[in-house]
Image (spheres, rainbow, N blue to C red):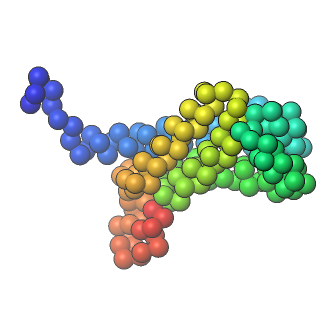
Amino acid sequence: MLFGVRPTTIKNTKAAIVWLRICSSFAWLDSAFVGKDAKFAPAFWHGGGLVSRVHTTFAHTAIDSRVVQLLDSYVVPHAALFALLIAAADAAAGVSLSLGAFVRLGAAVAIVRALVNIAVAGRAGTDTIGYNLMLVVAAAICIATAAGRKFGIDAWLIDRFPRDSLLRLFA
């Protein structure tokens, strides 16, 4: 013991990773279901809300003009499909991380969504970039540490099916 401080134990580290996993899940659940920008709101889900956001916000905050061209060429004509994909990705990442079910897959989805957020809203300010980079780091830690295997459904699945290699990849 150095200066009266106990070293961190493995048990404390696992609890901290579980806490990180659950806290980061709230950001994705909030994005999917809560507030004026909720992705499961009928206005957004049917594509109208997404088209409105592309023209009023993302056209001015995208990190590059090529991102704006991509949004105008592909996202706007297929707004209902992309709105559904965005809503499903936010909900899947949030549920996966909160329940500890298929955490590696859910965290990979979270990383992709956060990087897309940076691409379309990166010039909105450093807080937008910082918040999404924080979500990327949290998801990367969840992937690297298999965070669902402690206090999550992944632990039960791995115990139930110990030789399933595909499960070990995603859980």
| Near-viewer residue (90 or 65) | 65
Residue lying furthest left? 1
The residue shown at (31%, 46%) is: 14
Q: Is residue 149 above or below residue 90?
A: below
Q: Give the left or right position of residue 130, taking residue 146 as reference.
A: right
The residue shown at (9%, 30%) is: 1
| Near-viewer residue (151 or 47) | 47
Q: Is residue 144 above or below residue 129?
A: below
Note whether residue 164 is visible. yes
Residue lying furthest front? 65
The residue shown at (51%, 37%) is: 134
Q: Is residue 36 above or below residue 89?
A: above
Q: Give the left or right position of residue 52, taking residue 122 as reference.
A: right
Q: Give the left or right position of residue 42, taking residue 111 as reference.
A: right
Residue 8, quarter of picture: top left
Q: Position of residue 150 (x, y in %)?
A: 36, 52
Q: Position of residue 68 (x, y in %)?
A: 81, 44
Note whether residue 79 is visible. no
Residue 27, quarter of picture: top right
Q: Is residue 114 above or below residue 108?
A: above
| Near-viewer residue (110 or 95) | 110
